[in-house]
């Protein structure tokens, strides 16, 4: 039996382009953590100041997403993507040229203002160009950007910083991103079909209309809690592995490497699975696996390296299944005329909730004099509770999308 949708050569190109573009964005964000050991003494800054350098990206990205929502559907998505991607490259270049804490802080704000919107534009492009029945496959490929940054990007960035200073990784990202920008200009076709569907009125009215839709608000609430789990566990992951599980600093890169490779392989497979089984069912299965692994992992003491790697593999598979299936399902919520604004607001709230979740996790977890983390198991139970609430919030979204597609299919079939 032939597949429901055979990808054209151009569709495969767009999928890979968005994945590589997302790789540069994710790498720019993730590289900050490993650079802390070099950055703090080089700029003579405290851990609190470094924490602000990291978190200011998320908050500026959240603000820019909300500001961009009003006009996100008023332009060709290719031009909008280029505008924000050029701003992201500029911000990253400023990071690579920074010689002081204040300059670096400003550079991270610029990078967040532009880079934080790119993910939402990419999501809108996926929803514009691909039918819902294959969006799981597309999201599965795009999400490999996170795994690729973990497997290739971060180790390479650390290697460059150790040999040529902490500026080198940012300058490398600028070089690679510039090439991606050239490909976008020369190969990506205009994406402007949504312009014919635009309503009259100002950008503010368009934003107010988007924020006033009940089903959109329900989705925004689910998205905010969806980001909570990962952002709560992520900031303390390496410290917990070293001080609680007994993993050495030399073994830690191996843990990240193996889990990254696992996610890189599993992502596209999970995407296909979600298209075949259903987005919501896949989301529930991923959540079920996470609800089993998270409490076990967060309650461990000194643990053999092999077991830590295996648990991390299952945890990352579960998280990947939730992200891919949820992203594909949420992409079907907005109407074509509202996709850009909806995705921008959604991304903004995701960034904001991530920052709040990281801060909240710090209120739960404490550290002893020898570095061991306390109450990490409590954090695990909070994450599980948030995951279960999201399952309940996603169900009416799933049902509404299914009913809407069924109604659209009655007269003339589901449009692509």
Image: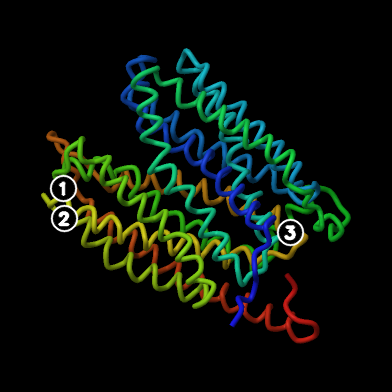
Marking on residue 245: 1
| Residue 29 screen position, x and y as percent | 47, 37
Sooner in the amino-acid sequence: mark 3 or mark 1: 1
Q: Is residue 248 visible?
A: yes
Report, in whole angstroms, how far the alpha carbon at label 3 lies from the one at label 2.
Answer: 46 Å
| Residue 77 screen position, x and y as percent | 74, 48
Which residue sits at x=32%, y=16%?
A: 41
**Number of other residues with Cα within 10 Å of mark 3, as a class: few under 14, some 14 to 19, many 20 or more:** many
- Of residues 127 and 350, the one nearer the viewer is 127
- Of residues 287 and 137, the one nearer the viewer is 137
Report whether 157 appears left or right of 179.
Answer: left
Report whether 373 appears left or right of 1.
Answer: left
**Residue at the disc numbered 3:** 338
The quadrant of the image that shows the N terminus is bottom right
Sooner in the amino-acid sequence: mark 1 or mark 2: 1
**Residue at the disc numbered 2:** 300
Helix, strand or loop at label 1? It is: loop
Helix, strand or loop at label 3? It is: helix
Q: For residue 316, which quarter of the picture?
A: bottom left
Sooner in the amino-acid sequence: mark 3 or mark 2: 2
Report, in whole angstroms, how far the alpha carbon at label 1 lies from the one at label 2.
Answer: 7 Å
Q: For residue 42, which quarter of the picture?
A: top left
């Amino acid at each position: 039996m032939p597949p429901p949708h055979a990808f054209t050569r151009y569709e495969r190109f767009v999928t890979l382009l968005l994945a590589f573009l997302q790789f540069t964005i994710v790498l720019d964000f993730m590289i900050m953590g490993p650079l802390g050991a070099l950055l703090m003494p080089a700029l003579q800054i405290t851990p609190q100041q470094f924490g602000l350098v990291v978190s200011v990206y998320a908050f500026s990205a959240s603000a820019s997403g909300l500001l961009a929502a009003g006009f996100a559907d008023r332009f060709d998505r290719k031009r909008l993507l280029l505008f924000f991607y050029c701003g992201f490259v500029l911000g990253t270049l400023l990071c690579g040229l920074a010689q002081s804490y204040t300059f670096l802080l400003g550079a991270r704000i610029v990078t967040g203002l532009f880079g934080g919107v790119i993910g939402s534009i990419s999501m809108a492009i996926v929803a514009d160009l691909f039918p819902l029945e294959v969006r799981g496959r597309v999201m599965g490929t795009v999400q490999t950007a996170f795994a690729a940054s973990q497997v290739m990007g971060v180790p390479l960035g650390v290697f460059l910083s150790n040999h040529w200073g902490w500026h080198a990784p940012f300058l490398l990202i600028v070089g690679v991103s510039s090439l991606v920008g050239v490909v976008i200009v020369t190969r990506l076709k205009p994406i402007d079909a949504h312009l014919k569907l635009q309503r009259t009125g100002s950008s503010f009215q368009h934003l107010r209309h988007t924020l006033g839709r009940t089903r959109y608000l329900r989705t925004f609430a689910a998205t905010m809690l969806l980001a909570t789990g990962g952002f709560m566990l992520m900031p303390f992951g390496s410290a917990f592995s070293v001080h609680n599980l007994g993993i050495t600093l030399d073994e830690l890169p191996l843990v990240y490497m193996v889990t990254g490779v696992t996610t890189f392989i599993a992502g596209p497979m999970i995407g296909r699975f979600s298209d075949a089984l259903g987005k919501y069912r896949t989301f529930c299965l991923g959540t079920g696996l996470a609800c089993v692994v998270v409490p076990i992992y967060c309650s461990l003491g000194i643990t053999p390296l092999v077991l830590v790697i295996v648990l991390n593999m299952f945890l990352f598979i579960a998280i990947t299944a939730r992200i891919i299936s949820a992203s594909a399902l949420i992409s079907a919520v907005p109407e074509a005329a509202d996709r850009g604004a909806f995705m921008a607001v959604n991304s903004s709230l995701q960034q904001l909730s991530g920052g709040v979740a990281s801060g909240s996790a710090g209120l739960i977890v404490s550290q002893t004099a020898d570095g061991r983390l306390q109450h990490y198991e409590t954090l695990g139970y909070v994450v599980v509770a948030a995951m279960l609430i999201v399952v309940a919030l996603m169900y009416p979204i799933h049902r509404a999308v299914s009913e809407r597609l069924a109604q659209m299919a009655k007269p003339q079939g589901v449009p692509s």
